[in-house]
Amino acid sequence: MPPQTPPTNKLYFYYGHRKPTQNRPTVHGGLFTNRRTVNPHKPPISTRPTSFNFDNWDPDSPQLAQPITDPSAHFFSVAQSLSPIARYIVDSFRKHGQWGPQVVSDLNKLRRVTPKLVAEVLKVQDDPRLSSKFFHWAGKQKGYKHDFACYNALAYCLNRNNQFRAADQVPELMNMQGKAPTEKQFEILIRMHADANRGLRVYHVYEKMKKFGVRPRVFLYNRILDALVKTNHVNLAMTVYDDFRNEGLVEESITYMILVKGLCKEGRINEVSELLNLMREKLCKPDVFAYTAMVRVLVSEGNLDGCLRIWEEMLNDKVLPDVMAYSTLILGLCKGNRVLKGYELFKEMKERKYLIDRVIYGSLIEAFVGEGKIGLACDLLKDLMDSGYRADLAIYNSLIKGLCCANHIEKAHKLFQVTVQEDLQPDFVTIKPMLVSFAESKNLDDFCKLLVEVQKLGFNVIDDLGRFFSFMVEKEDRVMIAVEVFDHLKLKEYCSISIYNIIMEALYHIGEVDQALLLFRELKNLHFEPDLSSYNIGIRCFTEIGDIQEACSCYNMIKQRSLVPSSGAYYSLVKGLCKTGYIDEAMMLIRDCLANVTNGPMEFKYSLAILHMCKKNDAGKVIEVLDEMVQQGMLLDEVIYSAIVCGMCEHGTIDEARKVFTYLRDCKLLTEADLIVYDEVLVDHTKTKTADLMLSGLKFFGLESKLKSKGCKLLPS
């Protein structure tokens, strides 16, 4: 007997899912040898449950809300809900990315693609080109016909990928392939366009329905009318409604309400009345909810006359208005400056013992204060408190403002103390009317007492004063009052750089440049360090009085801090340099401004265009730029004239420059006196340029020392 060889351990490889038995557990893919894994070092499995702490859970955590950016991850998440063959088709689309022989080869491996499978693939496809190609390929199978689900899925796919115009052609495609479109296909298209607020496309689909002889149901008519009304195509909606009536269909209440709200939005109240009469004859009279909806639409459009007319219609129908109807109309009347009519409705609510919301009280009080009827506003406040309500801060702010306007500052101050006692946390809006009243009456002692009082309440007084002065200088007649208040507050050390800047800016705009410069110098002498806004104001003020050296000093201070001046400061300084004859320096500043400022002055941009045209030594090209400026409505000033002088002296000739200035005189854009002045500037600047050029040449050839020894006047001593 031959010797037996010892048995060897045969390796068995299992892939995928294996059916479990009684003696064999479930095995998922991997490498196995007689139930033993190749890698004996298995990581230990922790069986200890981890406790979950709700305190550490953040529902807005970025890890939980992280979107899926990997296309493969998105594919596998979608593929879980697909059948195996659909998953195979979608995976082929994913691998190849576009329709081609590879995709067709993968599809030809399948025995047959059914309409159900086509619809399943189209429902998850995001590429409209691939979807259309696949749809066409499936239709060419022998004995195959698309069903309604396939066409619907194709329409959804195209619309989902913003190809809604192609989706509108699906009914024609169905008709060509012998499948007459039904109302369902058109309803899908209408719903898609209505959800995207494409009213004209809805009407286009409706016209196509009539072409195919499809008669919409009442429900679909309502959908079409609603989409047209929401997109402000009321005339088209009325045209569709005429077709609705011609077909003998019976309106529903929603049909009337859609049209009525659209007509209310357009302000066509006469047509609204006609529709309401039809509604009463054919269906029923509108209820309080319908009337409230109409009033709300009219209030949003500011059509108060239409509101009152609809209100009369409601009363004639003996429909009792509810609290919501009253609130909607009263709030609209108060916003539309018809507070007395709103107050009458308020009294009706009181007589009918309706529960009146605090918003109605607040709206009436604010409206009465706006019309200067403080007594009625205070009566409403008392009525509000007697009704068991607690007034909010907005109501107190309105009353304080009204009392201050009526010169009842003491009563306003008492109301302010009430807001403090009731812990309503008053803000700057609360104290601003009192501060303005104290300032205008020059009662500066009480002004300071109020500041001390609010400072104890935790107010940031300096910030509030900045907002106060910003409000005061909005009107020119209150600028000097603000200056007086500021002079008084400086003695009590209520000042800051921002307040200085506000006052200086206001003084500059009203022409009090000397007083603004006094504040600027005072700011530099104090312990405050001027900021960018301070120096910007200083540049404009010094340029205004002709002190170009100080203006340039402010500009240098800004540059030393690596900051950028404002466009107004740049323009003012350039204009001042041009007036004083520093034309080259002005052109350098223009380039610096356009390099650092986002939206520089248009005059600077045209100046560079003029300099560029001067390189051609053609007066006609420069004149074309000037004509464009005039057509744009821009005024020609010193900056433009200096650009002409600089450009022609550097790149052109004096004769070409004189042609440009002569043209401006003939067009009456330049006076005869200014023509003479700029001709002299042109000659002087040309001499200066020539002397600088000659000096540079002498320095280059080393002849500077010989000219100095002979006492030549060309070089400075």
Image (cartoon, rainbow, N blue to C red):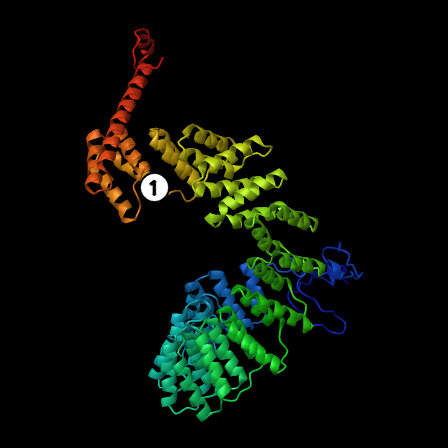
In the image: residue 672, left or right of residue 206: left
Asked if residue 145 is positioned above or below residue 515 in the image, the reply reads below
Q: Which quadrant holds residue 713?
A: top left
- Label 1 neighbour load within 10 Å: few <14, some 14-19, many 20+: some
State the quadrant of the C terminus. Answer: top left
Q: Which quadrant holds residue 389?
A: bottom right
Q: How many marks?
A: 1
The reply to whether residue 116 is visible in this rendering is no
- Residue for point 56% across, 50% down: 441
Kindly identify the amino acid type of the residue bearing the numbered disc 1. Answer: Glu
- Residue for point 60% across, 41% down: 489
Residue 690: x and y in percent read 27, 22
Name, please, the residue furthest toward the top: 709
State the quadrant of the N terminus. Answer: bottom right
Residue 598: x and y in percent read 43, 43
Question: Is 326 or 24 nearer to us in this picture?
Answer: 326
* Residue under pointer 1: 603
In the image: residue 595, left or right of residue 693: right
In the image: residue 136, left or right of residue 323: left
Which type of secondary structure does the marked residue at label 1 adopt? Answer: helix
The reply to whether residue 579 is visible in this rendering is yes
